[in-house]
Amino acid sequence: MIPYSSSNGTPSAGLFWKRFSAGLGLGGALLAGSLAGCSPLRLLAPGQRLLHRVKVEGTERADAERLQSLVQQQPNSTFPLPKVAIYQLGRTFYNPDRIQRNLAEEYAHYTQRIQAAGTDSAEVGKLLTKRERHVRRHQLALDKGNAIMRLGEPPVVYDSSLTARTVEQLSTFLRSKGFFRNSVTAVDTVPTRTFAPLRLLTLRSPFRAEPRRVTVVYRVREGVPFRLSQLDYDIADSAVARYVRAGQPQSLLHVGDQYDEEVIGQERSRLDNLLKNQGFYDFREQYISLEADTSFAPATVRLRTLVAPPATGGPHRQYAIRHVTMVTDAGLVRFGRQRDTLVRDSVHYLAYEHRFSTKALDRKLSVRPGHLYSQRNTQLTQRQLANLDMFRFSAVTYRRVRGPEAPADSAQGLLDATINASPAKKYQETTEFGGTYVAERVGPFGNVRWKVRNVFGGAEILELGLRAGFEGQFSATGGDGTRLESVLTTQLGANVNLVLPQFLVPWRTNRYLASYNPQTRINAAYTYVQRPEYTRTNAEATYDYIWQRNAFQQYVLTPLDISIIGTPQISAEFRRDLELLQLTQGSPLIRAFDNLFIPSGSATSVYNSNDFNQTRDARYLRLYAEAGGLTRSLYQRQPLEAASNRLKVYDFGKLTADYRRYHKLGPSTYVVYRLSGGLATALSGTRTTIRGDNGVILRQETDYLIPYDKYLFAGGSSSVRAWKPRRLGPGSFTQYRYDTTGVLTSERDYNLEQPGEVLLEGNVEYRFPLYSFVKGALFTDFGNVWALRSNPQRPGATFRLNKFYRQLAVGSGIGFRFDFEFLILRLDVATKVYDPTAPGSKWAIRRFSLREDQTAFNLGIGYPF
């Protein structure tokens, strides 16, 4: 049926279409006019052209990204924001004449005040500083524009000389990679097609060629790559030649490899390090040269490695270490006193007062008397002393033995090594006080931490911590049914941590393990939480072995981890709520308030090639495995009493993996992605007896139980950021609220934690600079948790291979990072895109809002990953 208008009987669709067409045409004309008015071409001077696009074509085997990075002139950035448009916006408010007048007026004003200050040097100094600050601010605005202009970019004016220079650099780079017959040309007369919507009004194509926009195309012809056909050595010094040939299996150059000057440079560095680690203290990389000869056969290179003799003639001298002296209190001066000397294993330890165990220090010294000089051992000694955290700095210096003490054999030299270490403060205190405003209440908190270095004289570190806080929270059971009651909760905690600079084992360890920076850590912690609904305590003790294979790889082995969790007080109303959740929806939250004994052991491997501020192209991989409660059959019989206050023990296993990749696209631009997964499960079933109020056994059941803290959770500022912490999932199960009478309602519950036994999640984030220390990020997160075993009370919560990918929640958002170098503050705003737990349509983005159940605001310190 065709709808008609009641006014004139004509089809209303036609009337609406005419009005829509007219509005569309008017809107298109206005939009086109706005775009024309914002064109960056308006900023160009006569004769100038805008660089619109750069392309490098013809690369087949060469690194296309490296070639693109060599282009001397790049067009304006358009992602994630059109920076030239931002620059134009700021230019509308830019008045250089006014800035120049303000600069002159303020300079004259402060000059007059400086003259009036006369001989008051303190006042003159303050005025000079203020004048310099004002002048610097105005000069920055004159040179680079106002703050909005500096957020953007000025139009890139095409420069043909930079194009010619780029052609030379591209050709040079290709030759360095073995493409000796390459050719590179550039064309800058390619017409740039732009979108001009007003041309549609004249029935012409909306695309036109814009002569003032330049597209530069670099055409590359690589040619046949040259390969190494022969590797020769020309080394007159027989000792040097012997070491070079012995290290040939580790060479980076091989017959058949493509010629690459970058690899040749790395081979020079390898040979330099090789010889410096074999006693050649005076050796320098400049002695090594590699000559390439391409005249023997087509597309082949004969490479000859030459090692020149020293400028003085004769062979390169090899040095051995005669004496090693360590000053453990470098920087201290005691007039009229000489440092006392202790000797251990031929090493002399000097100090006014020996506070450090020479046995502990001796394990950290790789520079030993009688050994050949080694650059590797020198660096290892400095790194191991730094890892002790006993010294502010340490340095190893060498002195050549000359004169009568020098050996008669001129080919052999002697060095005296001195290790200067300046001790750090023995006692260090950190105090932190602050407050939170949560649930309409102000809650103060305080943390006090003490560090005691060298507490027993063996370079040990003792750390003590106390924390106390009050935080507002909404009561889980209080209120009048329409509004939750706000209460203050009490949180107290203490911990003690002792770190020993060695493995504490019953057998004697050798010096070889010292290169792995072994440590033994003994830790004990206690936490007390009091709320109106319950009081909960947690006492934990761990015994860890920690060591490092290199600067990037760390291992932690925890053979003993014991936790005792107690709930001495829990309100009857809160217990009823927990039991109701367990009975009606299968929630394991009630086990978080059980009395538990958790013995376990774990192992952790962490590889991280990034730094604190995440400024490198790097990788991160963390693997974790834990097993607990394996011995419970020795001291606990089944079935367990469900309502008993006795300690319960559950056996369990847990595996997690976390991989992160940091791709550096520019000085401050990165693409980062993260993939994480985990599995937590009971190793055997637990039989439980449930009794009635009169003590009669109601039923016995067997379930696969694990401690609540060992479950896996998703959601939060370092997970899927559009969901509250630990509130995502499980699977597609929807959590609903109960009213005050215990009846299930149709209102979703976003406040209940959602534990799972399977975790899969990932993140993709694009990080870019915004302005000065402010950085931005665009991100998308996905993930969920699932149960391993079916539960009819939680439909959709079980992990299934044929449907889990349809239950992955997705959230996206934007973030801001305030990078103060020593501290990074973070604000992420994320909204739900796909919610697998939503009833009806899962596409939550269609219901976009800033409400708490749709969009989350995350504040944090440091990057999320």
Image (cartoon, rainbow, N blue to C red):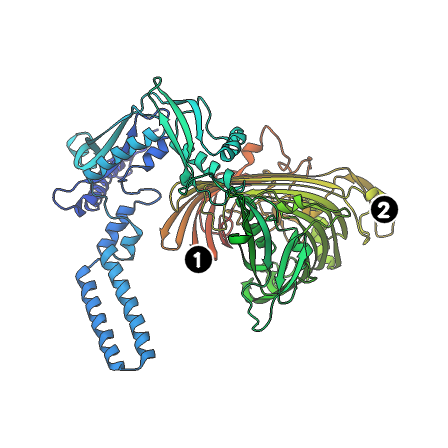
Residue for point 26% across, 82% down: 118
Q: Nearer the viewer, residue 739 or 827?
A: 827
* Amino acid type of the residue that numbered disc 1 sits on in the rendered structure: Phe
N-term-proximal mark, 1 vs 2: 2
In the displayed structure, would residue 441 be above or below residue 789? below
764 left or right of 543?
A: left
Rate crowding at label 1 as few (under 14), some (14 to 19) or many (20 or more) other CA atoms within 10 Å: few
Dot 2: what SS? helix
284 left or right of 395?
A: left
Q: Horizontal and vertical percent for residue 503?
A: 70, 49
Q: Horizontal and vertical percent for residue 122?
A: 34, 78
* Amino acid type of the residue that numbered disc 2 sits on in the rendered structure: Tyr
In the displayed structure, would residue 324 be above or below residue 339? above
In the picture, which quadrant includes the N terminus? Answer: top left
Q: Is residue 446 among what the camera can see?
A: no
Rate crowding at label 2 as few (under 14), some (14 to 19) or many (20 or more) other CA atoms within 10 Å: few
Q: Nearer the viewer, residue 620 or 678?
A: 620
Residue for point 72% across, 54% down: 540
Direction top: furthest residue: 297
830 left or right of 335?
A: left
Direction left: furthest residue: 46
Q: Horizontal and vertical percent for residue 643?
A: 80, 51
Label for residue 109?
none
Query: Which residue in the structure is indicated by mark 2?
Result: 635
Query: Which residue in the structure is indicated by mark 1?
Result: 820
Q: Quadrant of residue 500?
A: bottom right
In the displayed structure, would residue 169 be above or below residue 745? above
Distance (Cα) linking label 1 and label 2: 54 Å
Is disc 1 in contact with disc 2, using a CB cutoff of under 8 Å? Answer: no
